[in-house]
Image (tube, helix red, strand yellow):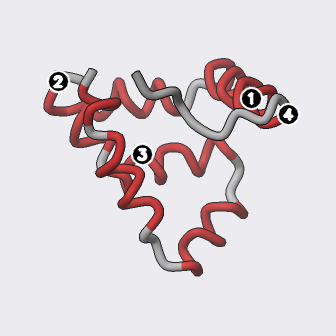
Amino acid sequence: GVILADQERWLGRLASLPAAQTQELQTLEPRQALPRIATLAGLDRIAAAHGVTARAAQACLGNPQRLQRLVDLHRAATQLGVTGTPSF
């Protein structure tokens, strides 16, 4: 999809954040940080371009069960040494 096709661009936006902003994001709880990260990366614009309303996007990003699942998956991947997505 579009998110993977545009991954280099939106990851680049995050990678170029000032250190102070990155540190600020790291102090937030995941439920607070994820919507902010999505906006900074431009993922909200990608979602909107595909018909996802801001309200629906916020509901998705603010869902504690889904967020916990993402945190758990990230933690497990990190423990397994996964550092990125595969290239095909």
| Distance between mark 4 and mark 1 Cα atoms | 5 Å
Q: Identify the residue at image location x=58%, y=69%.
A: 22
Tag in front: 2 or 4: 4
**Callout 3 environment at 10 Å: few (<14), some (14 to 19), or many (20+)?**
some
Residue lying at the far right of the rendered structure: 79
Which residue was labeled with disc 2?
50
Is tag 3's residue or tag 1's residue first in the polypeptide sequence?
3
Is tag 2's residue or tag 3's residue first in the polypeptide sequence?
3
The answer to whether the residue labelled 4 contacts the one labelled 1, judged by CB atoms less than 8 Å apart, is yes
Tag in front: 3 or 1: 1
| Distance between mark 2 and mark 4 Cα atoms | 34 Å
Which residue was labeled with disc 3?
38
Which residue was labeled with disc 1?
77
The answer to whether the residue labelled 3 contacts the one labelled 1, judged by CB atoms less than 8 Å apart, is no
Asked which secondary structure carries label 4, the reply is helix
The kind of residue tagged 4 is: Gln
| Distance between mark 2 and mark 1 Cα atoms | 29 Å
Q: Identify the residue at image location x=34%, y=30%.
A: 4
Tag in front: 2 or 1: 1
The kind of residue tagged 1 is: Ala
In the picture, which quadrant includes the N terminus? top left
**Callout 2 environment at 10 Å: few (<14), some (14 to 19), or many (20+)?**
few
Query: What x and y, as percent, mark residue 72?
Result: 77, 26
Which residue was labeled with disc 4?
79
Asked which secondary structure carries label 2, the reply is loop
